[in-house]
Every structure is written in structure tokens, then in C-alpha cells.
Image (cartoon, rainbow, N blue to C red):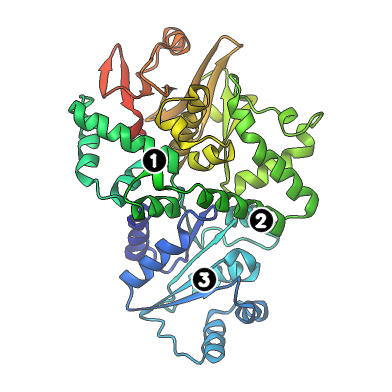
Amino acid sequence: MKREIYNKLIEWKNNNINMPFMLVGARQTGKTYILNEFCNNEFEKNLYINLDKSEDIREIFEETLEPDTIIQNIEALKNISIDINNTIVFLDEIQVSERAISSLKYFCESEKPYKIVCAGSLLGVKINRFKSSFPVGKVWIDYLYPMKFNEFLLAIGEEKLLDLIENGYKDMEPIIEVNHKKALKLYYDYICIGGMPASILQYIENGKSIANIDDDLLRIIITSYLADMAKYTENTESIKNTKIYNSIPSQLGKENKKFKYSLVEKSARSREYDSSLNWLLSSNMILKCDGVENPKSPLKANKVDNFKIYLSDMGLLRVLANIDKTEILLNKNMIYKGAITENYVAQVLYAKHHELFYWQQGNQYEVDFLINMEGDIIPIEVKAGDNTTSRSLNHYISKYKPKYSIRVSTKNFGFSNNIKSVPLYAVHLI
């Protein structure tokens, strides 16, 4: 399946190949798949090493950080010859070996043409808790997130529809209604299955029919996340991580989605859970959206204590919240459909490298997202349906007079009263 990150890998190959490439992301987002595709397609030879399953190779890194010695010892251990001029080495699950991560600095500084890519679940956590000196400036770090809607369309062969959507966004002109309805139908399929590559592959293999999709696959992914918490943290922190993660459906099910520690555990305090919250954020399993009362740049300098927490994937949120697919497809449970829709927009904006902020004035007004675009603060209002009446956005526009505003909904493209109407299936273009 095509992924946007592939273009970044090609850029790395063409410009910075001496610098090892580290792909960071949550489990099951497709890191191993896309790096294997890249290594197989773009290089004459490749060597794949799973450090989680190769204790003997981990021991080599424990003994030395010198690239020539590492390669020589791998050759002897595996009884192979490694042609470094034409071979790319893929170190998977590199988070299990801090020494292997440290060695990347020396591979980068070597005069020899070593080509190294690496990936692993919880790399964000490992980087934030690195005990040695992390090779800052010696590693090209990029992030892989669940597949966005445009990647979903590419995966199912809908390139022509994607072109229409991109043209509609560029011109802010409605696309023909029959294709608007088709795009919305596929969008609803997408938010039901989520952006995890395995889930999308299951959708394709089952004839692109939501009725044939088994939610057990997403439940298995959630179970693997919970298992990671137990495997890579101490027991007390793992319990807190799990409580926070499991509380998110309740957090987002409220009318006021501000994160409350009391929904994690009665009488809980922030100081007791801050470390666990940061662990989950570093793992890319959750996303944080900070509240802002004074929407001026830089937004980070004007954030307040209130914040919201979203899951990394709306499909996982749907399953964790035990929402049946038919409730989404038949427009039932509209309250929680709104939460899933908001989560969808959050994860897409985050994957587009927008920092997440929202605006709130007391208990009366709230705008779902604020993003900094070309030096201007742009408000984004999110609607799960076609009812686009918004007292909060109108109040925000009247008070702060932004360059323009964005309203995301099921309505077609348009630009009226200085508000861009962006269909839910086009959020990836913002």
C-alpha cells in the first residue's frame, strides 16, 4: 500500500543517506512494512535484523559502537558478506537496544557509505527516556501515523476521486454531487475501520464491504498496546497508563471534552498521572490538544491548563468505546459520532504536523481547533453532519476577525462569509 512517508525515504536516499533514518510511530502503523518495501525496491541488497528477536546481535552492540567492528561481527555471526556499497541495513525494533541507537552516531560519522534505516514501537518513549547521549543531529527522524483518508483512497485504487477532491479544495468549488456522496460513503467506511494498515487491508480483502469487517483485528491492536505498557514499564506505571488509555472514550463522550483525571480514577491528581500521560504521548498512542483563551501567536505561549486527549486512531476509539459500525453508517448515536469525528480531525491535523490547540471562553464558547497557517491563527469548527450552525465560531470571528475560518462538515466545498467549507473527506488537505 502506498504511503506518503515513502517520498520522505526517497528524499533521504537522494540527499542524506550518510545519516541513519529512524522511523518513529505507534505499533501497527506500518513501519516495518514500508521500510521493507523501501529497502527491497530501492537497493540492490538489503539486510533485515529484528533486534527484539536477535539477542546475539544485541550483544555485539553491547561490546562495541564502532561501525566496522559491528559489521564484521555480524558477518561472522551470520556467515554472510555485507557489501556496504550496495546494501542497506534495516534495524527493526531498535528500541530494545540503547547501545544500537547510540551506534547510529558513529555510522553517521563514518567515511564509509553505510546505509542504515531503523524502526521500533515506543521509540518516542525511548528517545525521551534515553539514559545515554542520544545522537542528536546524527539521525534523520520521521514519524509514521495511521493512514490518512487520502492514503486510504490510494490503497483502494480511488486515485481519480482523490484528484477531484484535491481540485475541489484548491478551487473551493463544489465537486459534482454524485462524487461528493461517493466520497462521503468512503469516508464513513474509513472512520469505521480506522487508519491502521492491517484494518484497511482487511477491508480490501473483504471486497471493500464494511459488513464483512471483523472488529477483532482492532481489538488485537488495542491488546498489543496494553501489552506494550506492561512490557516496557514498571507495574505501577503500566496500571496508570492503562487507566488513562481506557478512560479516553469517557473523556470524549462528555459535552465538555476537557480531560478530567477524576474519570481516570476517583480522587486522582495530575501529579500522580503526569508521568503516565507523558509516556502515552511519547508513544504516539494518544494526542494532546491544549486549551487557549487568548488566540495569539505563538499559541504554545498562550495555552492554559485545560486540555483534551484523543486516541491516535478513530477506528481504535470506536472499538474501545464499543460503538458498532452500523451506528456510524446509519447516523445513530450522533453524540459519540461527533466525538469520533473530532478525533479523526485531530489525528489528521497532527499527522500534518499541526500542533493541536482549541479555544474556549468560559463555558459558553468553544472552537474545536486552532492552527497556525502562514503566520495567521485559523479557527476550525468540526461538525459530524450538515448542520453547520455555530454560535461559538461566529462569536470567535466577531471578536478576533481571523483572516478566514474553516468549517469541516459533510457539506460540499465552498467559500462564503469568509468561511471555507471543507468536507470531512478533505481534512488531509488543510
Indicate left or right for 55 with 402 as reference: right
Report which residue position mark 3 lands on: 91
Query: In the depicted view, which residue is nearer to us: 152 or 405?
Result: 152
Which of the image's four quarters has the N terminus?
bottom left
Label drawn at residue 114: none
Query: In the depicted view, which residue is nearer to us: 391 or 410?
Result: 410
Q: Amino acid at mark 2?
A: Ala
- In this rendering, the count of numbered labels is 3
Report which residue position mark 2 lands on: 227
* Real-space Cα separation, disc 1 to disc 2, in angstroms: 26 Å
Residue plotted at (67% across, 58% down): 130
Q: Are marks 3 and 1 in contact (CB under 8 Å)?
A: no
First along the sequence among labels 2 and 3: 3
> Outermost residue, right direction?
267
* For discs 2 and 3, the disc positioned in front in the rendered view: 2
Query: In the depicted view, which residue is nearer to us: 185 or 29?
Result: 185
Report which residue position mark 1 lands on: 190
Image location (x, y in percent) of residue 74: 54, 85
Q: Amino acid at mark 1?
A: Tyr
Image location (x, y in percent) of residue 380: 42, 23
